[in-house]
Image (tube, rainbow, N blue to C red):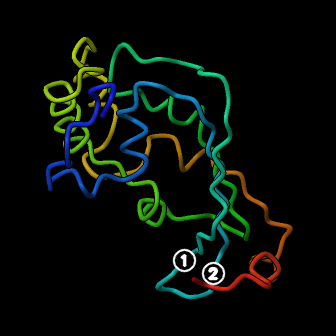
Amino acid sequence: LKNNLYRGQLPDEFKDLTWVEEMVCAIYRTTAHVTRLYGSTEENQPFVFHGNTCAHDMNVVSTATVLPRVPADILGQLTVVFVGPGPIKKEHLKLIFRIRKNKVWRFLCWLKDNNPLYKALTLSIENANMYGDDDTIPGLHESIIYDKNTNPTEAFKAETAGVSEP
């Protein structure tokens, strides 16, 4: 409130933004994200996402002057490690790493009109068009690191041993 950056509540249309969509719209890039997914034998739940997204504090590595960020910027700060035989189907990745080009564009336009930090930024439709209409970050599927030597069920059980759900 003191620095006049609070603009109230987000409009309803932006309340379902994914964390990846927010990364694409962020002016400052200060963290690296490491996500660990476990393979699952359940057909309706192809992998388990369990408390292993780590955000590491780093020096500010870039301040955007043009938004949205290009896919290479996001891939440069995101690592996905899959524990299991793989491969992960692209449509399953969309459950966690979803990005909707039109929603991102509308959000950036709204930010430019409603947030003083975004007023002077250039919005690039060319950058926005690098994303699919409703997909994952381009190149993410090809950049996954597979840990095929670890049993996903045993690793997941070991990691969650003694952890109770709230």
Q: Check contact, mark 2 vs mark 1: CB within 8 A.
A: yes
On the image, the x and y values in percent for residue 136 come to 41, 50
Mark 2 lies on residue: 40
Look at the picture and state if 165 lies above or below 12: below
Q: Specify which label sits upstream in the sequence, 2 or 1.
A: 2
In percent of the image, x 15 and y 56: which residue is there?
Answer: 12
Which sits in the foreground, 10 or 1?
1
Residue for point 64% across, 45% down: 79
Q: What residue type is disc 2 on? A: Ser
Identify the amino acid type marked 1: Pro
Give residue 106's quadrant in the image: top left
Give the quarter of the figure containing the N terminus. top left
* Residue beneath disc 1: 46
Mark 2 to mark 1 CA distance (whole Å): 5 Å
Q: Indicate whether 31 appears above or below 59.
A: below
**Badge 1: how crowded within 10 Å, few (<14), some, or many (20+)?**
some
